[in-house]
Amino acid sequence: MITLARILPLAILLALGTAQLSAEPWTEPLGTIKKVGPEGSGNAEAAEAWKELTSQGSAVIIPTLGAMENAGPLALNWMRTAVETVFDRELAAGNDLPTAEIESFVLDRDNAPNARRLAFDLFTRVSPDAAAALIPGMIDDPSAPLRRDAVAQLVAEGKALLADDKKDASAEVLGRALDGARDVDQIDIIAKLLREDLEQKVDLPEHFGFLMYWNLIAPFDNTDRAGFDTVSPPEEKIDLEAKYTGKDGKEIAWQDYSTSNDYGMVDFNQPFSPMKQVVGYGYTEFESTEARPAQLRLGCKNAWKIWFNGKLLFGRDEYHRGARIDQYILPIDLKQGKNTILVKACQDEQEQDWTVQWEFQLRICDETGTAILSTDRKPTPEPETPTRRRSEN
Amino acid sequence: MRATLLFSSILLFASIAHADWLNFRGPNGSGYAPELAGLPTELSAETKAWEVSLPGRGLGSPIVVGDKVFVTAASGPDQKQLHVLCFSADSGKPLWERKFWATGRTMTNNKTNVAAPTPASDGEHIYALFSSNDLICLDLDGNLRWMRGLTLDYPNASNSLGLASSPIVAGDTIIAQIENDSESFAAGFDLLTGENKWKIDRPKAANWTSPTILGNGNDAIIALQSSKGILGVVPATGSTLFQIEGGASTIPSSSAAGDLLFIPSNGLTVYRADSSGDEPEKLWNESTQRPGTGSPLVIGDKVYIINNAAVLTCSDTKTGERLWRTRVKGPISSSAVSADEKFLYVFSENGIGQVVDLSGEEGKVVSEFELGETILGTPALDNGALFVRSDGHLWKFGK
């Protein structure tokens, strides 16, 4: 009598065998590569898998590009080098490459942004004219690396129109370039052309999504840089009506603050005057239409900490080594409705001219750098507007 | 016809008699490779063997392994694309290139860039470190062996001005100093897997100096320099052998010669140190001999430093007594290198390659050649050849 107990192992073996037969030769190595983890874990296995993957022909290119979806940053690089190694070798040997499939991969906006940029670069090497023809359509591409070329084309077109004194046409083209641009260097060039040569108004803070309205409180003590780790009252509870004893025993209170700076710089030196060995806090709120993943992007040359919705996201105790837009990128999950942001900015004891800054800039965007705006975002303050406004409380 | 072929074969054989320059400043990070011979004594259009374009910025030195030259670069609007490039040392022909997406922060001061550290090699693999804290191991044919994203593992280990310390291989360990104001550490990584063999906390202060090897073989010591001084550690374990206090520069690195360590500290300070467990012995200090950005170069019984005013000083290694000094064309960010007691090579930031004749009573610049590009990196040497790079090009001078 054939019992279920006898049939089941056989069925499992058959199922496994079928699965193995149907698995493609790149499936297992790609799975191994995806497992590379922290502190070198999985490197030895990935090296063997990479060798196996790259020993195959050009058929591995598309599956490997596809496997980049949801891969970690290290696995992405293992896959990238595998794709390029196989591509270089097959191209040099004059073997057929899946050119049409690579183009389709580029055009499918659901694929991973970096993988699509890589595929585009490969496509350019084998079909440069066809690749160039794709560029104009990428101006609104979800992949910021792909937008860049389209923006560059529009900037060149806008400049040419400007040189021909076709200002209206130039402004229209550069406006489209600005809408598409996500990289700071390109945005700066476009804004300068629009403002200085075409007398157009450009709201850079809104384009970037900088947070312009804050409540600030300072100074707390940072003597000997101890304030970075010291928990001051704003870290325990946000109460904008409260008054606290600050550095040197003085009573301090929250102040309303807004900035008109193009790059959203929140400057503690403005309302509080330049100080040394002090800590300041900035607090603001952000209304989101929906729960969604997003990024906080910070630039700051002081030591800092950030809390999002009451939870410490990250902190860094580096002073005056430089700052830039998007210096630190912190993933967050916006919740629908009100979200809270608290920034701690510490000023140290250095006295050199280049250590005066006590400031930060913060924006909220998606992973491509596209601004996400609060539903109750106020108009960007005009530069003439006083940047310091006393609390009404 | 046969004679021509035979002659060509002899030339070919002669042209591939390479020696290795495996890391920043060559053997043990000293800048001095006396086993090399036949280097050009003139830098000129006539002695320029080849020139190739590079795809991105970089100031890390080239390294030479066998008949291949390796160099790193970083490209893109935020220098987020990393490159490891391999060229034929003989012809400059590109052999392979591997590209990576940086996994760590790529912000640097404008003067430097993400490809500031010089790669290192054990003769079989390339270990490329970038300011983004990506540490990548490839074999000589470009096969990826392992990759570490050190900022992924240690999120505050970065310097917003950029990191520049170059790793070095000692035994079966590659040692890197990831030193900064925040999460500051040094670590030894397994050559084959990239896993940590050891990791030690380091002073929380920006530091651009590179580890130096003191001694050889089983007695080799890694000298880790920082603003606090020198920490001597066992390469395989990171265990402390000795400490030299009194502070040290955070830009020019120390140079070793035998059991002597020439430290950019309060000018130049020389210690005798070994792995015996004895306290290092201070031999001398000369506060006026202050290396600028480049590191000291020890050749025999003489030590050479170039200060921030581009004055090259030669001193006695035993006493510190200044023997002579001469001005070279500056400003200079690179370190001087040499293969014998006769000539020293150094490049100015303005791209002027200079050969200094050391054989006379005083040093004398005997050759100058303008490359026309900014040169911040230190040249690499090979038998009969010198390699140097800019943000845009890699050049070979010599045979």
Image: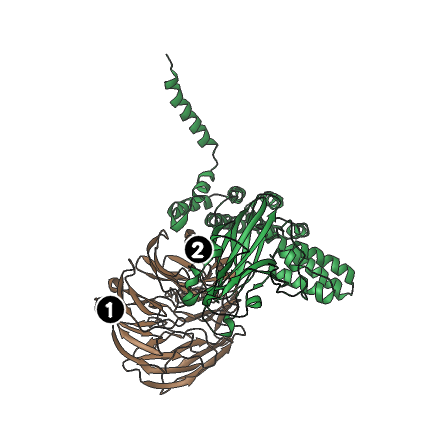
Chain colours: A green, B brown
- Measured as percent of width and height from the top left, residue A146 is found at 61, 52
Q: Nearer the viewer, residue A325 or B96?
A: A325
How packed mark 2 is, by other alpha carbons closer than 10 Å (few <14, some 14-19, many 20 or more), is some
Q: Nearer the viewer, residue B56 or A301?
A: A301
- What residue would you read off at disc 2? B155
Residue topped by disc 1: B274
Number of disc labels: 2
x and y percentages locating residue A343 in the rendered image: 52, 57
Q: Quadrant of residue A271?
A: bottom right
Task: Quarter of the image for the C terminus of chain A: give it.
Answer: bottom right
User: Is the N terminus of chain A in the top left, top right, bottom left or bottom right quadrant?
Assistant: top left
Q: Chain of mark 1?
A: B
Q: Secondary structure at mark 1?
A: loop
**Can residue A342 be seen at all in this image of the molecule?**
yes
- Tell me the distance, in whole angstroms, between the alpha carbons under discs 2 and 1: 35 Å
Q: Amino acid at mark 1?
A: Asp
Q: Secondary structure at mark 2?
A: loop
Between circles 2 and 1, the one closer to the viewer is 2
User: Horizontal placement of A17 versus A171: left or right?
Assistant: left
